[in-house]
Image (tube, rainbow, N blue to C red):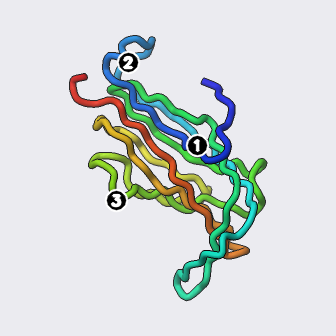
Amino acid sequence: MDQAPQTGTATFSIHRLTRDASLLRVTDAGVQQNLTIKVTFVYSALTGNSKVVNGQTWYEATGTWSFAPVTLEIPYGDTADVKIKMDNNASTNGWKLSQFLPKSTNPGGGPGTYSADADGDIEFTDNNSVAGTYYYGLYLVNPSQNYYASYDPAIQQDGGGEG
């Protein structure tokens, strides 16, 4: 499913379909999917906020975020290997994915904390069948400038149960 990238302040989502909605699709239940979200970040300015990590000061930055695709659909009963990648060609130079962290207000059962791997990607398997909306912090760093930026993507879980 090709979609135009989302820009501005809207969030991307992972939509886990209900059993009834999945039956309307032409897919086999229990399929392992491989899904990729490309993240673009174009730096605009520093916010004036900072934090100290391991004795080093990091400065918060703002910018324009884009996600492609905006929504990933996961039919009920399927699991999905999700990869979050930086679109380095469209992003401001030097920015890298750092972490994907669940918010403390999330219901139980969603994907947990993940850090970028050696390739700079964040990868996890979503095999959750618990309905709800899950919020995460997506953190980027620019190590050469000691800059960081964060965004709160939502993962929508509408499946689960016997629904």
Give the quadrant of residue 131: top left
Question: Answer yes or no: do the residues labelled 1 and 3 have beta carbons within 8 Å?
Answer: no
Which numbered tag is attached to residue 22?
2
Most foreground residue, 139 or 120: 139
Q: Where is residue 95 in the image (x, y as percent from the top left)?
A: 69, 61
> Element under label 3?
loop
Which residue sits at x=62%, y=77%? 58
Is the residue marked by circle 2 packed among few (<14), some (14-19), or many (20+) residues within 10 Å? many
Q: Name the residue under label 1.
A: 10
- Amino acid identity at mark 2: Ser
Which residue sits at x=38%, y=42%? 133
Q: In whole angstroms, how far apart are the C-alphas of marks 1 and 3?
A: 21 Å
Is the residue marked by circle 1 packed among few (<14), some (14-19), or many (20+) residues within 10 Å? some
- Amino acid identity at mark 3: Ser
Q: Name the residue under label 3.
A: 104
Which numbered tag is attached to residue 155?
none
State whether residue 142 is above or below residue 156. Answer: below
Give the quadrant of residue 101: bottom left
